[in-house]
Image (cartoon, helix red, strand yellow):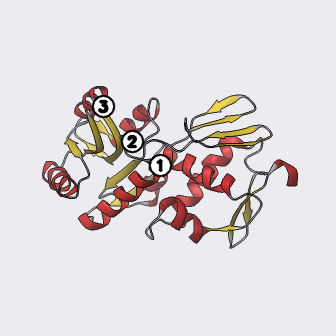
Amino acid sequence: MKYDCLIVDDEKAIADNTKEYFNMFDVRTEARYSMAEALSFLSENEVSLILLDINLGDGSGFELCKHIRKELSIPILFISARNTDDDKIIALNIGGDDYIEKPYSLGVILAKVKVMLRRFGSVEEKVQSDIFEDGKIRVDKRNKTVTIAGEEKRLTSMEFALLGYLVENPNRLITKAELFDNVWKDKFTSDGTLNVHIRKLREAIEEDPKNPVHIVTVWKEGYKYVTGAEK
């Protein structure tokens, strides 16, 4: 079976309420309440996006995210009452695409999920064919792959979308506001979230991530993707 969203949360009432709300607005959603149940569901069904709580009865959302990332690059949005910066940084560093604090507004979280589904495509949609090549870097939108000097790099959906936008707009300043509007497509994303994704992209594509030559910071303004011709 194919679903737009899987909610993994051991707070059954919250998970079920969110599931019912999403289904009312034609976002086909299921809920599971433990790590084991989520893994079993994913082994038998296709999902476009996951809402993942950190605290699960039989494990942690962090552990589950690491496991999922070995196989899937779909968006993973963490949902948690834990609101420390350390938790948010861990969530993003291990492959999460966003971090939403509980209690959350059903309307706001639905809007975020719909934005993600539009950006990355639901399980029923086709990915537009497009290939970007810049010397050693190759971005294949059809297959959602990035190859550096012949070596394929694994990126999350959000990392891929961010890189895709940067390479589509080479050699010009792209402000943080522009990235929020065109990659995340919402006003709720923080600078910290963007900074983590930029750092992880640099680790994937730069020879020296601490001294990047492709994804360059424009101080206090944003970023610029510099092509091989202008390095």
Q: Position of residue 72 (x, y in %)?
A: 44, 34
Q: Which residue is mark 2?
A: 62
Q: Amino acid at mark 3?
A: Leu
Q: Position of residue 86 (x, y in %)?
A: 46, 55
Local packing at callout 2 (Cα closer than 10 Å; few below 14, some 14-19, many 20+) is many
* Cα–Cα span, label 3 and label 2: 16 Å
Q: Is residue 218 left or right of residue 72?
A: right
Q: Is residue 135 left or right of residue 156?
A: right
Q: Are marks 1 and 3 in contact (CB under 8 Å)?
A: no
Q: Which residue is mark 1?
A: 90
| Residue 214 drawn above or below residue 140 | below
Confirm whether residue 213 shows in the render: yes
Based on the displayed image, in which of its 4 quarters is residue 139 positioned?
top right
Q: Earlier in the sequence, mark 1 or mark 2?
A: 2
Q: Secondary structure at mark 2?
A: helix
- Residue located 73% across and 70% down the image: 219
Q: Earlier in the sequence, mark 3 or mark 2?
A: 3
Q: Amino acid at mark 2?
A: Phe
